[in-house]
Amino acid sequence: MGELQCAGAKVKDQRDARRGDKPGSDTLDRVLLACGQDLPAGASTLISGSGDQEVRRVTLRDESTRIIKSLPLPQRDRLDAEADGLRALARSGRLIVPACSPPVIVDQRAYLVMDEITPSRLQSDDAWIAFGRSLAAHHGSCAESRYGWHRDNYIGQTPQINTRCDDWVRFNAEHRLGFQLSLAHQRGLLSASDQAQLRLVIDRLDTFIPRNPRPALLHGDLWSGNALATVLHGRQCIAVIDPGVSVGDGWADIAMMRLFGGFPPSCLKAYMDATQDRDQIEQRVLVYQLYHMLNHLNIFGDSYRGSVLSIACQLARL
């Protein structure tokens, strides 16, 4: 191919990438081949691009679709952690999660290829009720005996420390609230008095959460954007994506579900009706919500400081 043809092809590839078609010449085909997919890619659409991460919907030549996430090679661990979490959640057979291949490396970027969860508009509460029951069954089926996980992972963009522990209070004090508080201190996001107030909460954790709740495999980041309505075998249902898994108290997932809304009351009631452990629910939920608010403070900054201190004040009054 001559220089003018090469230049023209390069311009076309750049133009296609801007309008959401297949980026580059054969990158996606090579990614799919590395994942064991023998069908070439057709058109692709950029779903989101945040920082270094890019998420694309790719239509294969047989009209099936895949979601492909990519990150620079030094950040591959984030995709390894996501794939590990999806496979772990799928093992109980109670939750619907997208199938995925192990991440692959192409041209100094890491790629995670997943089946697409096709969104659907729900017409009734039935799917949400079924999801609440399925989540309770999933939590109740965990065979792990210790809190934490076999590897560290991520909660959003923040590292999540999962060092195994036999004591749930200690685990939260060190690896959840304590870790987030240390990050906030390093980043200058909390005053000395703010930190002292949060330390008082951590010092009293044994009065708010049980020391040995029944271990449950948590999704870990179960806000409404990670619970997708879809249709499977002709029935409406809920699938989950983007986990930050660890073994802990099942009510930690409910805490996140309640934090930002988006889950109907029928779903939460179905979970409660299927769960026998209901001691001090509100106190436990507040502690687990404090973890997520601290994480939002560390990711998004000062706008979440008030929410962090509000939860700390509520716990201080208990």
Image (cartoon, rainbow, N blue to C red):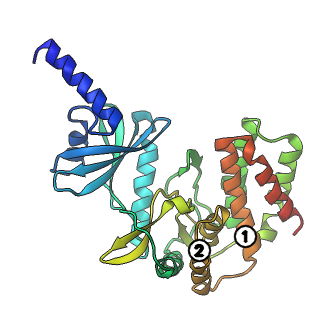
Q: Earlier in the sequence, mark 2 or mark 1?
A: 2
Residue 316 point in image, percent of width and height: 87, 62
As drawn, which residue projects farthest toward the left? 1
At x 67% / y 63%, what residue is drawn? 259
25 lies above or below 116: above
SS under mark 1: helix
| Amino acid beneath label 2 | Pro
35 lies above or below 9: below
Q: Is residue 151 left or right of residue 315?
A: left
At x 49% / y 75%, what residue is drawn? 143
| Amino acid beneath label 1 | Arg
Q: How many marks?
A: 2
Q: Residues within 10 Å of mark 2 (few under 14, many from 20)?
A: some
Which quarter of the picture shows residue 91? bottom left
Q: Is residue 220 left or right of residue 6?
A: right
Q: Locate the C terminus by quadrant.
A: bottom right
At x 80% / y 50%, what residue is drawn? 306
The answer, for residue 102, to whether it is visible in the render is: no
Q: Which residue is at the front of the view, 312 or 17?
A: 17
Residue 41 point in image, percent of width and height: 21, 46
At x 86% / y 56%, what residue is drawn? 200
| Residue 284's disc number | 1
| Residue 264's disc number | 2
Q: Is residue 214 left or right of residue 64?
A: right
Residue 11 point in image, percent of width and height: 26, 23
